Image (cartoon, helix red, strand yellow):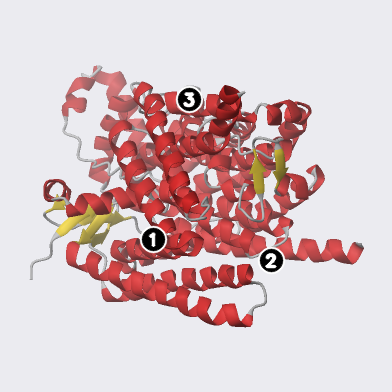
């Protein structure tokens, strides 16, 4: 059967899997809690402490239910190993320019940051950028118009 | 005497380790909101009767560890680790796209270490400075809470709508309290949990409404790109001061001090503002990205520490967004801890620990969290991110929280407790979604109902 995918609370779920997971979570956690409460009320002198411990067992039950669901239902995510493509990096610079305007000069940087850039193979990228700016005073708008390919997945709004 | 002190320190150490380990793991799960996780687990620790130092170290070490490991999904997967990580997404994504996510990660957690170590003494210092005003603040607490609720609402996304929405929200809480009171049930945790978990409850209800469900539909699974593993220099425990350059350490320290003093503001807002403050003073864009992300993650630590410690030490009243939210059980966890607005009577960590104990156990918690979460994040970030994104389904996370709602609700008030969680959660979730009436405002609304309204009624009746 074709999965019915929905965005719930910030990530993707399959509706049927979600329903099963909730049922499993409810059954496991509540039976842990009620079973623990039943026995602890007899064993522990203070009823209040017995109930607090029963809640602890119930929370362990929540985790057990979650673990069971994690084993039964695989994540609905496609995870790929992704190394930023060097060809993209110049695109990122134009995105950065859109966001911040002037990117600044390497001459402003302290030596340790310059070394960091060299270690990360980013030094040449910024050198080229500066040369490009100086030489032809190239219209930066052309670079800016290049479509942004960097998909900024900001997945907030959960709370 | 010496032996009992030794026992206390040992308990504090053990609870600190426990908190750091649990919340270092929770931090890896993207979107695991601080309030939803810290508040119920801290409450549990309080109610189980753990001595006061252990309660404090559990909470603080948990918060500090979580705000280090939240850098893993934020930097490597491009999804915010929790609510406090949202303001870091822009810089994290740019650095990821430049192909240096591990730099983002290393800088973030190094900033966290420095800021956390600075924040504890600063928070104690500011608390001592404020303490002389403590009594007058306690006496006028109901009105201060009302003012704080209105201010926090005004500065939320909802602006005037959020301020006005406080009225029906407070009325609903009063109505629910009256209802449960008729059956002899007095609830508090259920309100906290309902507010904290409201967005999930609202989303689950929306799933059941055909029109809303269509809006939530996706045609295919989302693709996440995980940045590859890069071997780091600096050994198992790199010196944070060497991961950062001097300017970055300095800015992290400055923003940590400032954000420790401004304990009444929203921690997310402080993180944003401090980042802007730093960003405007760094010229080169790469340096700006790395410095801003360092300082911002530092602020996620320092605001949390200060917003919990200052009100605890100086007033014993939950007078900050963190104290009203994730740290609420440190102030108010009946029957063990209580805040009585009418008499200004307080019985919680404020009365159980003195200033030096707050300082000592606070530092202990921070050091324990650093020793656990910092090397873990430095060395195992890639493997942790890969495991969580490939093995832990969102269905399982939701199932765990649904279980939590059921257990806590029924434990505190039986069916009535459960109904209160669902009612408050549904209302709060939708108010937050449509009006920007966020969780912080809702917590202040709860305190307004509990503290201000009785004082108001007394005033009008007199």
Instruction: Indicate the position of residue B443 as horizontal and vertical percent values.
Output: 48, 39
Q: Share a chain, discs 1 and 2? A: yes
Q: Nearer the viewer, residue B311 or B373?
A: B311
Query: Residue A142 appears in which quarter of the rendering?
Result: top left
Residue B100, relative to residue B289: is it above or below? below
Q: Quadrant of the N terminus of chain B?
A: bottom right
Q: Which residue is mark 1?
A: B401
- As drawn, the residue found furthest toward the right would be B1
- Of the image marks 1 and 2, the number of the one nearer the N terminus: 2
Query: Residue B394, relative to residue A153: is it above or below?
Result: below
Pair 1/2: label in front: 1
Q: Position of residue B97 (x, y in %)?
A: 31, 44
| Residue A92 horizontal/vertical position (percent) | 28, 36
Q: Earlier in the sequence, mark 3 or mark 2?
A: 2
Determine whether, in the image, residue B335 is placed left or right of residue B356: left
Q: Secondary structure at mark 1?
A: helix
User: Tag 3, which chain?
Assistant: B
- State the mark number for residue B207: none
Q: Residue at x 38, y 46 (%)?
A: B424
What is the CA distance from the residue labelled 1 to the residue labelled 2? 26 Å
Which of the labelled discs sits on residue B150, or is there none? 3
- Residue B99 appears in view: no
Which residue is located at x 26 percent, y 61 percent? A79
Q: Which residue is mark 2?
A: B14
**Dot 2: element:** helix
Q: Say which residue appears at 50% left-offset and 29% top-offset.
A: B149
């Amino acid at each position: 059967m074709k999965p019915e995918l929905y965005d719930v609370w910030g990530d993707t779920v399959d509706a049927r899997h979600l329903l099963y997971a909730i049922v499993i979570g409810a059954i496991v956690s509540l039976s842990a809690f009620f079973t623990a409460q039943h026995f602890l009320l007899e064993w522990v002198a203070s009823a209040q402490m017995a109930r607090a411990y029963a809640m602890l067992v119930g929370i362990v039950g929540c985790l057990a239910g979650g673990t069971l669901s994690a084993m039964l239902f695989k994540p609905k995510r496609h995870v790929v190993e992704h190394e930023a493509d060097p060809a993209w990096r110049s695109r990122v610079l134009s995105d950065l320019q859109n966001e911040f305007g002037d990117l600044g000069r390497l001459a402003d940087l302290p030596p340790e940051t310059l070394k960091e850039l060299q270690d990360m193979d980013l030094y040449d990228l910024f050198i080229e950028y500066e040369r490009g700016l100086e030489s032809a005073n190239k219209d930066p708008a052309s670079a800016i118009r290049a479509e942004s390919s960097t998909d900024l997945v900001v997945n907030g709004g959960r709370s | 005497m010496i032996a009992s002190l030794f026992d206390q320190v040992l308990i504090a150490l053990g609870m600190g380790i426990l908190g750091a380990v649990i919340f270092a793991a929770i931090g890896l799960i993207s979107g695991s909101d601080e309030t939803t996780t810290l508040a119920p687990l801290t409450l549990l620790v309080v109610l189980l009767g753990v001595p006061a130092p252990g309660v404090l170290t559990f909470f603080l070490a948990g918060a500090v560890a979580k705000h280090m490991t939240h850098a893993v999904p934020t930097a490597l997967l491009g999804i915010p680790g929790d609510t406090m990580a949202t303001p870091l997404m822009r810089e994290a994504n740019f650095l990821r796209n430049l192909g240096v996510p591990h730099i983002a990660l290393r800088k973030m957690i190094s900033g966290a270490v420095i800021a956390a170590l600075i924040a504890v003494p600063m928070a104690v210092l500011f608390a001592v400075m404020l303490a002389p005003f403590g009594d007058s603040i306690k006496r006028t607490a109901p009105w201060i809470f009302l003012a704080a609720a209105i201010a926090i609402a005004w500065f939320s996304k909802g602006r005037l709508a959020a301020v006005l929405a406080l009225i029906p929200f407070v009325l609903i809480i009063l109505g629910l309290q009256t209802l449960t009171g008729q059956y002899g049930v007095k609830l508090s945790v259920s309100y906290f949990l309902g507010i904290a978990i409201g967005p999930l409850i609202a989303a689950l209800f929306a799933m059941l409404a055909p029109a809303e469900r269509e809006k939530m539909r996706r045609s295919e699974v989302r693709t996440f790109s995980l940045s590859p593993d890069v071997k780091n220099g600096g050994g198992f425990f790199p010196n944070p001061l060497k991961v950062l350059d001097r300017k970055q350490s300095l800015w992290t320290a400055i923003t940590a001090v400032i954000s420790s003093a401004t304990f009444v503001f929203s921690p997310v807002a402080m993180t944003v503002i401090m980042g802007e403050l730093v960003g405007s003073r760094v010229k080169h864009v790469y340096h700006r990205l790395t410095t801003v992300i360092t300082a911002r993650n530092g602020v996620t630590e320092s605001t949390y520490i200060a917003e919990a410690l200052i009100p605890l030490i100086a007033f014993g009243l939950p007078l900050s967004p963190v104290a009203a939210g994730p740290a609420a059980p440190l102030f108010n966890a009946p029957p063990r801890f209580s805040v009585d607005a009418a008499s200004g009577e307080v019985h919680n960590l404020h009365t159980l620990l003195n200033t030096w104990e707050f300082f000592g156990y606070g530092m202990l918690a921070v050091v324990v969290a650093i020793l656990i979460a910092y090397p873990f994040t430095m060395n195992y970030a890639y493997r942790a991110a890969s495991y969580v994104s490939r093995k832990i389904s969102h269905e399982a996370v939701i199932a765990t929280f649904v279980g939590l709602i059921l257990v806590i609700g029924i434990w505190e008030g039986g069916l009535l407790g459960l109904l209160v969680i669902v009612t408050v959660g549904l209302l709060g979730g939708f108010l937050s979604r449509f009006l920007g009436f966020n969780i912080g405002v809702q917590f202040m609304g709860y305190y307004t109902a509990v503290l201000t309204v009785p004082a108001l009624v007394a005033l009008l009746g007199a």
